[in-house]
Structures are given as C-alpha cells and as structure tokens.
Image (cartoon, grey):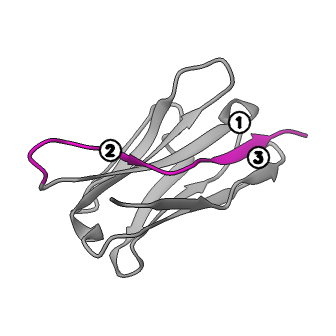
Amino acid sequence: QVQLVESGGGLVQPGGSLRLSCAASTSSFAFYVMGWYRQAPGKLREVVATVNPGSGTNYADTVKGRFTISRDNAKSTVYLQMNSLKPDDTAVYYCTAYDIRARERYNFWGQGTQVTVSS
C-alpha cells in the first residue's frame, strides 16, 4: 500500500502561480508512474499531467505551456508547478501513482488538495 500526501493548494488570483507537492510512502518511488488529475464541481476527473520513471512527461492540452510536472526520486516526491493560472483551473487536484513493474496496473490516489483561482 502506497500513501500519497498532497500539499500546496490554496487560493490564488488569475495569472498567479502555485506549486503542488505529493509525497509518496514507498522506497520504490523510482519505479512509479506519477500523475496529477483534477476534478472541478460537476465535472469528471481529468488527467492534468504525468511523469514516468524516466522523467518523460505528458500534459493535457489545456495546461501545456503553463504547468510543469517533475519528480525528485531521492525525496519520493512529485511536483506540479502551475503558472498563469486561470479560473478554469479551479478544482480539487489529486496525485496518483502506479508501479510500472506490476503485472496488473493499480492506481493509488491521494486525498486531494483544493486549488481555487479567483479574484
């Protein structure tokens, strides 16, 4: 069982920045694909960004050029740097992880952190 603890959410004005962090309770962090998802009120949960063990990244079109996902294997932590924030970025942001070595994929989820973009 892997526990994921997110932090860094909050209230920010449009155009502002936030950095989310997600600490994972596993010594095998280097083998995990890490990701950030978000869910706005009344909407489905959607992927924001992912980073694989080789640090390859993927982003949703809506955040490309504004968000950056990164990982620090020594700290078992993944980050999401969010710049040029828009009101549409308001959502609960969830960290997720799965072991790339596993025969059957199983995603672990954090409890979520609220990001509110408003003036």
Q: Over which residues does the magenta segment extend? A: 102-119
Which of the numbered marks, if any, corresponds to residue 107?
A: 2
Instruction: Kindly report the distance in space between the C-alpha atoms of the residues bearing marks 3 and 2.
Output: 32 Å
Which of the numbered marks, if any, corresponds to residue 60?
A: none
Q: Are marks 3 and 2 in contact (CB under 8 Å)?
A: no
Q: Label 2 amino acid?
A: Asn
Relative horizontal placement of residue 58, taking residue 78 as reference (left or right) = left
* Residue 23 locus on image (x, y percent): 48, 67
Residue under numbered circle 3: 15
Q: Label 1 amino acid?
A: Thr
**Can you say whether 104 is above or below 22 in the image?**
above
Helix, strand or loop for disc 2: loop
Count the labels in the image.
3
Q: Label 3 amino acid?
A: Gly
Magenta span: helix, strand or loop, mainly?
Answer: loop
* Residue 109 locus on image (x, y percent): 44, 47
Residue farthest along the bottom direction in this orientation: 74
Helix, strand or loop for disc 3: loop
Residue under numbered circle 1: 90
Q: Earlier in the sequence, mark 1 or mark 3?
A: 3
* Residue 111 locus on image (x, y percent): 56, 49
Instruction: Kindly report the distance in space between the C-alpha atoms of the residues bearing marks 1 and 3.
Output: 13 Å
Helix, strand or loop for disc 1: loop
Residue 108 drawn in magenta: yes
Alpha-carbon neighbours of circle 2 within 10 Å: few (<14), some, or many (≥20)?
A: some
Name the image quarter holding residue 81: bottom right
Q: Nearer the viewer, mark 3 or mark 2?
A: 2
**Residue appearing at x 71%, y 36% in the figure:** 90
Instruction: Kindly report the distance in space between the C-alpha atoms of the residues bearing marks 2 and 1.
Output: 23 Å
Nearer to me, 31 or 66: 31
Q: Are marks 2 and 1 in contact (CB under 8 Å)?
A: no
Q: Earlier in the sequence, mark 2 or mark 1?
A: 1
